[in-house]
Amino acid sequence: MSIVLSSAQMKEIDKRTIDEFGLPARILMENAGNACAKHIVDNYPGIFTQRVIILHGCGNNSGDGFVIARKLYMAGIDVKLIKVHDSPFTPESKANYELCEKLKIPMQDYCKKTEIKDWAELSLLADVVIDAVFGIGFHGELPEAVKMAFHYTMPVCQTRIAIDIPSGVNADTGSCAEGAFIATETLCIQCMKFGHVLSQGRIYSGMPTEIDIGIPVEYMDDIYQLLVDEDTDMLPDRYPFANKGNYGRVLLIGGSIGFSGSIALAAKAALRAGAGYCVLMSRPEMAEHYYHLSPEIMFKSVPVLSDTGLPDKNKMVEILKTADSVVIGCGLGLDEYALNLLRIVLEHSTVPVIVDADAITLIANNPDLTRFLDNENNVLTPHMGEFSRLCKINVNSILNDTMSALRKYVKKTHAQVLLKSHTTIYCDESLVLINTSGNDGLATGGSGDVLAGIIGSFAAQQLEMPFAAIGASYVMGKTAEELAQKRAPMSIIPSDIIDNLFVYPRRDNE
């Protein structure tokens, strides 16, 4: 797993490294530029026969760029410094700029260029462009000269490297200013930032690569914001001498007239993900839809009161005692029956509850239910639209600053939330886990139901909720990526994910 930082956290860690650890800012800049240059030389061998331009301003990000220019130039690489933003130098940046002057590295000032022919000529100067204009402190709009430099060099340079974060990308939100730099690779100084994985920043950053600059790892020990990867332990334990009772009983509650498929997908996914038992429970009138769903899946009708037709609370409480996890909401409906059933589950279940789909909308429409979210056993799994209903914020505002909206809701409700999107985020009051696996093959109705089933399965197999939730998301994403090697992502459907779960390449020791 990789740590993911906010800009404020990164600045504080830098400050501690300088003030407490005693590593001067000048040395940190030297370490950053030297490590970036080494990565470039080691990973782009063709660069020795190519022309490189480094776009810069005067801040510390540009200072890193000056160190890179110096190292590349001394390695015999054709490198030019192109100034596209004018502002006061920082002391460290000025010192490194002066070293470049002493080496007579070619420099040009494009800050006041206005003629199209000048910018066209700039595009002919380079095969590789390195963006060292703005760093993680950027906000607002890009100056015109910067936009012009990006506009004319990006189309002709197939290798586009951003230092720390592409200029124009907000390091905290991933939102992008007009004309932001689009990198093929971003060299993330010390750690990844939220802007590398959120919103448009995920696309504009290209391939993010962490560059160690010598900051003590102890300064990040209390930061629990992590990007999961193949090395993260996110799967339930399995044992050679186990039986079905060791892998839990998942109770899946949902389905209504016209919406019978969603809970069926969830149940099949739970079974495929390793649960020992799967029990699908739905309204009595739905029995004919599920009795022959799958020979491995048991069906039970929700017990109802004869006088009202509403769920029988006492009998449901007894049924809940037999489960090791509960999935509720897939196709559940939004009527009084569904509301009563959800209330019983939230109030009386003592095992992990995965709250999905209609159950989320019911909570959004009935705020009194939020009191049940302060329970480490429960997790909400909304997509952006459902989360918008929960927190009463429009979707665009959430997309513009996802982490702030998510943290505000979690702080208010004490809930555990898995927010589903192209970047999926698990968040509780102390932990953030981020997953970027997957592709557009998951942008199909029913994918969320499959995810809910896998989470329920992992939870029933005694995986802690944070890792059950983010682990299920990771597994789905990797499965979709592997399927995309065999068929177009647009043709992938949720049943394909279920049938091919865990087919992605895995480490030998798994």
Image (tube, rainbow, N blue to C red):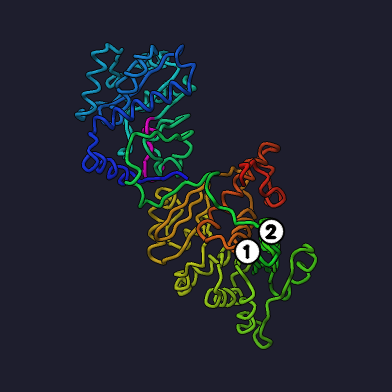
Left or right, 102 with reference to 503: left
Q: Residue at x 24, y 15 (%)?
A: 101
What is the spatial separation of the Cα atoms under label 2 and label 1, in whole angstroms?
A: 9 Å
Residue 205, image x and y in percent? 45, 35
Which residue was labeled with disc 2?
A: 265
Residue situated in front as seen by the camera: 258 or 417: 417
Q: Residue furthest bottom?
A: 307
User: Label 1 sits on what residue type?
Assistant: Cys
Which residue was labeled with disc 1?
A: 330
Q: Say whether residue 173 is magenta.
A: yes
Q: Give residue 326's quadrant in the image.
A: bottom right
Residue 504 visible in the current orientation: yes
Asked if marks 2 and 1 touch (Cβ < 8 Å), the reply is yes
Q: Say whether residue 358 is magenta.
A: no
Residue 140 visible in the current orientation: no
User: Label 2 sits on what residue type?
Assistant: Leu
Q: Residue at x 65, y 43 (%)?
A: 504
Residue situated in front as seen by the camera: 90 or 324: 324
SS for callout 1: loop
Left or right, 507 with reference to 199: right
Does label 2 or label 1 sit earlier along the sequence?
2
Residue 132, image x and y in percent? 34, 27
Magenta range: 163-175
Left or right, 494 with reference to 101: right
Q: Residue at x 55, y 65 (%)?
A: 355
Circle on res. 115: none
> Which secondary structure is most common in the magenta stretch?
loop
User: For the residue carrying disc 1, how many other residues have a C-alpha within 10 Å: few (<14), some (14-19), or many (20+)?
Assistant: many
